[in-house]
Image: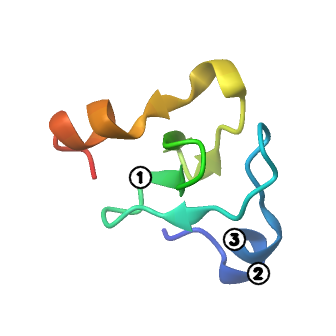
Amino acid sequence: MAINKELLDILACPKCKNELKLTQKENGLICEKCKKVYPIKEDIPILLIEEAIDLDKFEQDGES
């Protein structure tokens, strides 16, 4: 199940308040300003700064 488009429109990065974009595999939300990915687990976005993954690491692990 994909994240609801209306929900995605109102979500923002908890660190910088920038907009978030869905990853290609729809398993995370990307903040391009902070270069962080917030994971989506069981269709729930985990928007905790300490749970964010560096974008480079996320892409290296093949999760994007």
Q: Is residue 52 left or right of residue 47?
A: left
Q: SS of the residue at dot 1? A: loop
**Residue 48 position within the rendered picture, expressed as x and y whole percent measured from the top left:** 72, 29
Query: Is residue 26 depicted above or below 9 in this figure?
Result: above
The amino acid on which the numbered mark 2 sits, given as a three-letter code, is Glu
Residue shown at the point (70%, 64%) measured from the top left: 19
Number of residues whose C-alpha sits closer than 10 Å to that of mark 2, classed few (under 14), some (14–19) or many (20 or more): few
Residue under circle 1? Answer: 27
Q: Is residue 39 left or right of residue 25?
A: right
Residue under circle 3? Answer: 8
The amino acid on which the numbered mark 1 sits, given as a three-letter code, is Asn
Q: Is residue 1 left or right of residue 49?
A: left
Residue at the extreme top of the image, as rendered: 50
Work out how far the residue at label 2 is from the one at label 1, CA to CA, in angstroms: 17 Å
Q: Are marks 3 and 2 in contact (CB under 8 Å)?
A: yes
Work out how far the residue at label 1 is from the one at label 3, CA to CA, in angstroms: 13 Å
Residue under circle 2? Answer: 6
Q: SS of the residue at dot 2? A: helix
Work out how far the residue at label 3 is from the one at label 2, CA to CA, in angstroms: 5 Å
Q: Is residue 10 left or right of residue 39?
A: right
The amino acid on which the numbered mark 3 sits, given as a three-letter code, is Leu
Residue shown at the point (66%, 81%) measured from the top left: 5
**Residue 62 position within the rendered picture, expressed as x and y whole percent measured from the top left:** 16, 43
